[in-house]
Amino acid sequence: MKFSVAVLPGDGIGPEVTQESVLILDEIGKLYGHEFTYAYGPVGGVAIDSFGTALPAETAKIASKADAVLFGAVGGPKWDDPSAAVRPEDGILGIRRHLKLFANLRPVQVYPELLEASPIKPDILKGADFLVIRELTGGLYFGKPKKRWETKTGRQSVDTLKYSETEIRRIVRVAFELARGRRKLVTSVDKANVLETSRLWRQVATEVASDYPDVAIEHMLVDTAAMQLVSNPKRFDVVVTENMFGDILTDEAAVVSGSMGMLPSASLAGIPDLDQGKRTRGLYEPIHGSAPDIAGKGLANPTASILSAAFMLRYSLSLGTEAMAIESAVAEVLREGYRTADIAEGASDHLSTVEMGSQILRRIR
């Protein structure tokens, strides 16, 4: 089978980790008889430097024509001026909007070999395995008005937190559909004791739950969820929440896995139906940022990007067996003791980005 992949490496360590994922996909193609073609496009800070925008029209076109998008990371100190009219993050926000990607899936799995890599006690971590589903196109990041202005008493600013019933219903439904294939528990996270949008969120989530009598639902305030993530992560199965809460909680969840370099993500335009082989448009990226402090030094962990490529095979290309081959290779490499600096638990002996990618590639072969 032939598949087209848009590759948007971005800034910092994005190009380094994305290149390892491309090599893995090429190997999968050889072994399973598929052909992957790649179209590259600039995004983020590098696009601002060359085109004055974080998402050039040609990059958006490349993404639209592809079967799936493999994304790196955007941002860095060079573009951190808070008064800048254009920021690298506009690239990822823009591509999500352009492709109508509303559901972000971030699995958090604790590998037994990495229990000591986390600051959380191993007995708390052992057995934790949950999925966070974050709404991507609403909330504070997109609500209007969004502006800054001057007054006689000083500067002011406003962001608008807005959600519609339709936006809430569709993301909660994704959570319930995926929970049916897991442990059948959905934790809906909100701030209903303070926010009107959260009260609507909780009401709509309860209504959706009535369509899934085989799946249990619980409602949890976001501050409680933040505490439970590090004190009792095993209690979660599928967590669904709004845009900003999900952004923050999934970065916290990286502590559970041992490193942000281990967490992949998928941003989808629909509900995947793996049993029926139903594909959905998606963008796949590691949840870590551009890490400019280690860019170009060969220290980045490519695992999250490689696991994101496995997500791409599963959800956008309906290649579940091939996805499992990548995931099994990652698990085998960890079992055999190979580590990058971020998960080396203080040891001085660790692999470079390319070396870690090569070890995973060898296990696939």
Image (cartoon, rainbow, N blue to C red):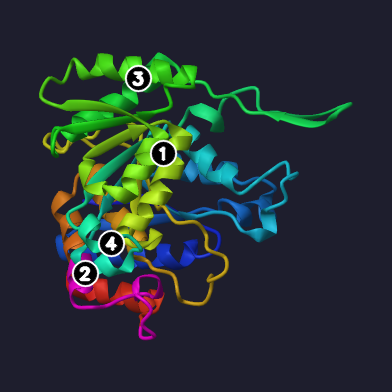
Q: Which residues are magenta?
A: 329-349
Would you name the residue on which mark 2 appears?
113
**Would you say the residues marked 2 and 4 are in contact, meaning their CB atoms lie under 8 Å apart?**
no
Disc 1 + disc 4, Cβ < 8 Å: no
Mark 4 nearby-residue class (10 Å; few <14, some 14–19, many ≥20):
some
Amino acid type shown at disc 3 = Arg
**Residue 337 visible in the current orientation:** yes
Residue at 22% over, 19% down: 209
Mark 1: secondary structure: helix
Circle 2: residue type: Glu
Residue 246's disc number:
1
Residue occupied by mark 4: 121
Quadrant of residue 58 in the image? top right
Q: Which mark is residue 202?
A: 3
Mark 3 vs 4: CB contact within 8 A:
no
Comes first in the chain, label 3 or label 1: 3
Inter-mark Cα distance, 2 to 3:
38 Å
Q: Quadrant of the C terminus?
A: bottom left
Other residues around mark 2 within 10 Å, as few (<14) / some (14–19) / many (≥20): few
Residue 151 in the image, given as x and y percentages of width and height: 85, 26
Q: Camera-side residue: 35 or 241?
A: 241
